[in-house]
Image: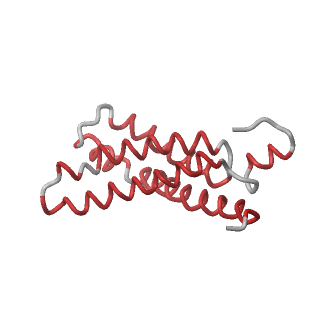
Amino acid sequence: MNRNNLPLHLLAARALLGSLFLVSGLGKIGRFAAVAGFMTSKGLPAAELMLLATIALEVAGGLALIVGWRVRYAAWALLVFTGLAAVIFHAFWAAETPAYQNQLNHFLKNVAIMGGLLCIGAAGAGDWSLDGRMRSQGLPNA
């Protein structure tokens, strides 16, 4: 790979991953009661409060990835969140036979997303980002 293309690749990776979380978080707002009910059915305490925190994390984290602001923090937070979501909501090992493959696919999708977040967390935002702009101006950033 040509290293000159790395900033463009990081921008694309951030935009793709960030849009996933942004759309997911915004979508939960319109389905708040249904999502809170689903979370309650999974045994989560204080589901409405946890859902508010989830929406805030997904929207803020998604936007942070897209614009490239404090990207390492956003990527690590979303990585932990995605791992927890995989274990709590996609427990394929406990699924009945008809749901097993679907839950395994969702679990593995989350694992793949975690891989992308791990790469972004390690690489940082790149030059085409708010973090990169701050760095080029000698300002402290993530």
Residue 63 at what x, y percent from top left?
A: 60, 51
Give me the residue at 86% from left, 39% from top. Answer: 138
Give me the residue at 61% from left, 51% from top. Answer: 65
Residue 111 at what x, y percent from top left?
A: 40, 53
136 displayed left or right of 75: right
Give me the residue at 44% from left, 50% from top. Answer: 29
Residue 32 at what x, y percent from top left?
A: 38, 48
Where 84 sits versus 12, above or below? above
* Quadrant (top left, top right, bottom left, bottom right) of the C terminus: top right
The picture quadrant where one finds residue 50 is top left
Quick one: which residue is furthest to the left in this view?
Answer: 97
102 displayed left or right of 126: left
Q: How is the image coloured?
A: secondary structure
Quick one: which residue is furthest to the front in this view?
Answer: 1
117 displayed left or right of 96: right
Along the viewing direction, whichever of 70 and 5 lies nearer the viewer: 5
97 displayed left or right of 49: left
Along the viewing direction, whichever of 134 and 112 lies nearer the viewer: 112
Quick one: which residue is furthest to the top in this view?
Answer: 45
Where 54 sits versus 98, above or below? above
Residue 116 at what x, y percent from top left?
A: 52, 55
* Quadrant (top left, top right, bottom left, bottom right) of the N terminus: bottom right
